[in-house]
Amino acid sequence: MKQTLFSLGLTALTALLPAAASAFPDKPVTIISTSAAGSPGDVVARLVREAMSEELGQPVVIENRDAAGGALAIDELLGTEPDGYHVLSTGAGPIVFAPLLQKAVDYDVSALKPVVMLAALPTVLVANPSLGVSSVDELIALAKKEPGSIAVSSGGNGTPTHLASELMKQLTDIDILHIPYRGTSAAATAVLSNEVGISFSGPGHVVDQINSGDLVGLVVNDTKRLAILPDLPTAAEVGLPDFIVQGWFGFFVEEGTPDEVIDMLSSAALKALEDPEAVSKLDALGFTVVGSGPAEYQAYLDKNIALWDGVIKAAGIEPK
Amino acid sequence: MDILANVALGLGTALTPANLFYSFAGVTLGMLVGVLPGIGAMAAISMLFPLTFYIDPTSAIIMLAGIYYGTSYGGSTASILLNLPGEPSAAVTALDGYPMAQNGRAGTALMITALASFFGGSIGIVLMMLFSPAIAAAALQFGAWEYCALMILGLVASSAISDGSLAKSLAMVVLGILFGTVGIDIYSGVYRFQMGVPELRDGISLVAFAMGLFGFAEVISSVRGAAHGAPRIQSVTMREMLPTRDDMRRFLGPALRGTALGSALGALPGTGPTIASFMAYMAEKRVAKEPERFGKGAIEGVIAPESANNSAGQTAFIPTFALGIPGTATMAIMLSALMMQGINPGPSMMTDRPEMFWGLVMSFWIGNLLLLVLNIPLVGIWVRLLSVPYGVLYPAILLFVCIGVYSVKNSIFDIWLALGFGLLGYGMRLARLPVAPMVLGIVLGPLLEENFRRGMLLSRGDIMGIFDRPISASVMAVSGLLLLWGLWRGLRDRRRAVARAEGS
């Protein structure tokens, strides 16, 4: 008897569930961002925020918590109920690189479930004109002739721009001198001032310098050419199809969030990416619009983690 | 003439009602967050960044820029009145500004600060109008060794920062440098002195450090005086607040020297207003005929750093706009506001979008003028703040300091950190250890280490690299002369003292 009542109760509850899910969202949704205001990850989230809010019929607010490499933001998310009202906006730093490069991270990456991947941001390899190279081939030839003579700047040891140069060393078997800087802006200044010969940089910050001839663009580390730098060859076009370096940005929720809610959040964000104005803005900033749902996103993540795990191990970089 | 046409074009943009409004809104907000201890330009600009999605890019940048240079105007107010800097760049202003206030000259100090800020800001703008491309090109000549030499010069000069014992001052500089080593080492990726606290990974927040050492420490030490301390009497009539003829006679030299140093250091992407104000103060004390007046309310000690940090605030825009590369995190947000609107920053911005560049520059003039006009009547109000009873004033200050420290990174830990530094600062006061050199240490130390190690990497381990390059070699020579001069002066003083002792 007891048993029957219990299962009856369960059935009643299950009957209620779809109604509960369709009621989502009945209050504002908070996006907790691991990116600082104005940084690429923040810009992507803000570009989809408004359309997403229209789609969900509720306000969507963004909260920037970039301290401690995003650890605080993730801790905050994991401390909330897994009901979809708190969404994490993040990128490769806290999800891919921190777990690979740190002995212990302060959050549990496996407790995060991918919702939607919004955009990717490839790096662009640039050279100072005085280096005298105008293609990746010429760069490799020069580096082989004078091993260790070409310096490459990065935004710091273990940052994506540093790992990009490690990837290049592994793919082309060249010897270049890595010089870390504090942040990617300083790294870009260094190649502009000819303190180093080459650098990996986000496209938006070097478009104008490439067009004005202050820098030479060598390759975009992506499978597609960029709208803002249409003359720059892709990795495959320079004969190095694996020379792909992408930052990526997307949303996650806490494990245990109902699938229906994840799907609603995901399709609202995807809808926002259909807005031509958002797309043209992302293009102009050098992003590649991606727009993949939870399953596709998870597959991309697995591949991305395996790629950098390989590069880090091959470079002999120990977790700190 | 070309420049006149550009000025006209710029005024055409800057004087539209909308842009006037955004300039006014920006500088007013900037001044207010500058006055409030702890809350800085970075936090205010981050908060307003989302707003720029909805307004014209030129207006957006006019407003954000107004916040940025407006804070350097307001930053010194609390330094002078309460001995707690509104911004780290105004920390050094407290050294002579606060004694001036204690001597009943708070109004004069604030007035002269407004004038010095306007002076420095104006010259910074003129430089930006006339020489942006040349200055940007010169700034690119500064590589690792040049920065390294500059930091060494700053440390050699740092003994001038306090009037107490040289040994104590140097010890505090070194302690500051040690605090600067906390956080990630960019060369190895190792986290130093993190002690399991994730918040320490990015290093010690400069705002938490300065607000703790100055703000919390000041509040703690005034608790004792609060019970029986009568509010300090200040002259608030306009006549008494106006600088005397003697003050004005002393104005031009420090203002010019401060502006020169500030403009130069502001235009370098690796340095900024904080280093500029410290360097200007140290230089001023070095050239002063009576250096012993410093630290006791010398007006030159207010004029030099204030003209320096304001001129630096203006020239910081030069590399940002002429090269398209932001020198600081704040500048990065501003450029991001432009990129959001489809404008890729870079050298072509000045030629392709002259109405924007010149509109911005002309809005700086308007903004600086607005700040001057806003500041003078406010001086009387700020000074009256001092007659607010301690029991009301200090809790309010604590609240603002906590909000400000939190707002930098939205981190509660930073408030605890500031409290810790407050206790340290209080202990240092009891032991008569100077605080300002420690702030200099935490600012210069990381830059010194970073550039020294980069220089060594680039010159393949050859330390003589620093003497191979003309700029770094000259700066090193100046440091060497400064050291010799200090030694010679020390010996001379000792000989005189000995002679006097023998004569008597």
Image (cartoon, coloured by chain):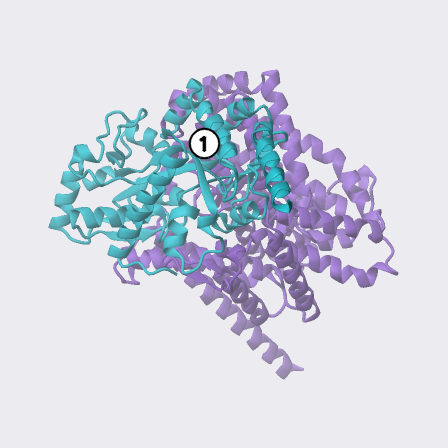
Q: Quadrant of residue B15?
A: top right
Residue underneath mark 1 = A44
The quadrant of the picture occupied by the C terminus of chain B is bottom right
Residue A70 visible in the snapshot: yes
Rendering coords of residue A152 (x, y %): 27, 48
Say which chain tag 1 marks. A
Vertical relation: A76 (above or below) B213: above
Rendering coords of residue B56 (x, y %): 52, 20
- In screen coordinates, is B265 left or right of B85? left
Looking at the rendered structure, the kind of residue marked 1 is Val
- Quick one: B127 or B287, which is closer to the camera? B127
The quadrant of the picture occupied by the N terminus of chain B is top left
Residue B362 visible in the snapshot: no
The chain shown in cyan is which?
Answer: A
Rendering coords of residue A192 (x, y %): 31, 40
Indicate the secondary structure of the residue bearing disc 1. helix
Vertical relation: B14 (above or below) A234: above
The chain shown in purple is which?
Answer: B
Vertical relation: B417 (above or below) A223: below
- Quick one: B171 or A266, which is closer to the camera? A266
- Count of numbered marks: 1
- Quick one: A6 or B108, which is closer to the camera? A6
Using a 10 Å C-alpha cutoff, classify the residue at mark 1 as few (fewer than 14 neighbours), some (14 to 19) or many (20 or more): many
- In screen coordinates, is A11 left or right of B423? left
| Residue at the limit of the structure toward the front, as seen here | A1
Residue drawn where x is 43% and y is 44% of the image: B268
Rendering coords of residue A281 (x, y %): 42, 24
